[in-house]
Image (spheres, rainbow, N blue to C red):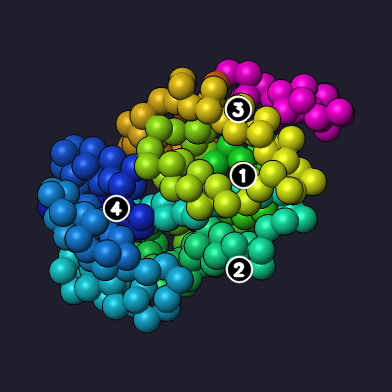
Amino acid sequence: MMSKVILITGCSSGIGREMAERLSENGYTVVATARNLNDMENLNVALKLSLDITNNESILDAVNKVMQHFGKIDVLINNAGYAFRSAVEEISDNNIEQMFNVNVYGIIRMIRVVVPYMRKERSGRIINISSIAGKMVLPVSGAYCASKFATEALSDALRLELSAFGISVVVVEPGNIRTNFMKTVQNNSDRIISDSNSPYDELYKNYKTFNDNARTNEPGPEVVSLVVQKAIEASRPKKRYMAGVPSFNRMMTHFGDGVKDCVVKSLFKIK
């Protein structure tokens, strides 16, 4: 009998690559995807495909190839993501659109193509990689958090809508994870948050200090891949799993708005 076929987006590095490697090593039939095939060189999986989740034709082409090779998709992991840091007032339309195009619309585009195959089998699991940023908001991250709050809402709706077809929907919420993704975010955002003429200059400096300190204790992507494997193998998975989130941050998600504001203002030295 063929092992479960798992389709993963965003496998060029970091969490996606780690998930693909771990699941493949554990006997799953893994289809790893990224925009650039060369970014998945030396990744040992059943099939590697080019897939741009912002392009409908690219998605259709990739999913058709999966079906031609294996005839089914048991698990879809929506992992591809994009982030940019800026105060809400200063972020460009282009950066907001890019985040939502990948983090939100990308998920919708993927499920539109994959779900009909799962529904036909009356079976399937969708795992959406969200973020702790979908549960709590920090300054300089408002637009990114908005995209992840949207991911959470979409996942809740999908879970209800697809239940009757035997398709389960799970959200995985990583904290800060030690990957190139975080370095890329910093590089993407540096022009904005390094602008000494910005009215948010002091906040940006405090953000960078806070972020640099937090990164010294970041766990690696393996903590996320372990949780994802658990979500795949559970007969009745939880609706949400946190991964690599410190205990205090977990507690923060349960605090009232007033308490959260006080804590965050203290951390970022906001008057």
Quadrant position of residue 232: top left
- Is 36 left, or right, of 106 in this rendering? left
> Residue at 21% across / 42% down in the picture?
21
> Residue at 22% across / 63% down in the picture?
37
Which is more foreground, mark 3 or mark 4? 3
Kind of residue sitting beneath label 1: Ser
Q: CA distance from mark 1 to mark 4?
A: 28 Å
> Residue at 63% across / 45% down in the picture?
193
- Mark 1 vs 3, N-terminal side: 1
Assess disc 2: are there few (<14), some (14-19) or many (≥20) residues with their C-alpha within 10 Å of its C-alpha. Answer: few
Q: Position of residue 243 (x, y in %)?
A: 47, 31
Which is more foreground, mark 4 or mark 2? 2
- Mark 3 vs 4, N-terminal side: 4
- Is 187 left, or right, of 210 in this rendering? left
| Residue that mark 1 sits on | 194
Give the residues drawn in magenta, as a range.
Answer: 247-271
| Residue that mark 4 sits on | 12
Between 243 and 81, the one nearer to me in the picture? 81
| SS state under label 2 | helix
Circle number at residue 209: 3
Are discs 4 and 2 less than 8 Å apart at CB?
A: no
| Residue that mark 2 sits on | 94
Q: Position of residue 270 (x, y in %)?
A: 80, 29
Q: Position of residue 65 (x, y in %)?
A: 22, 73
Kind of residue sitting beneath label 4: Ser
Residue 255 part of the magenta segment: yes
Quadrant position of residue 110: bottom left
- Is 5 left, or right, of 214 in this rendering? left
Q: CA distance from mark 1 to mark 3?
A: 12 Å
Q: Position of residue 263 (x, y in %)?
A: 77, 23
Which is more foreground, mark 1 or mark 2? 1
Q: CA distance from mark 1 to mark 2?
A: 19 Å
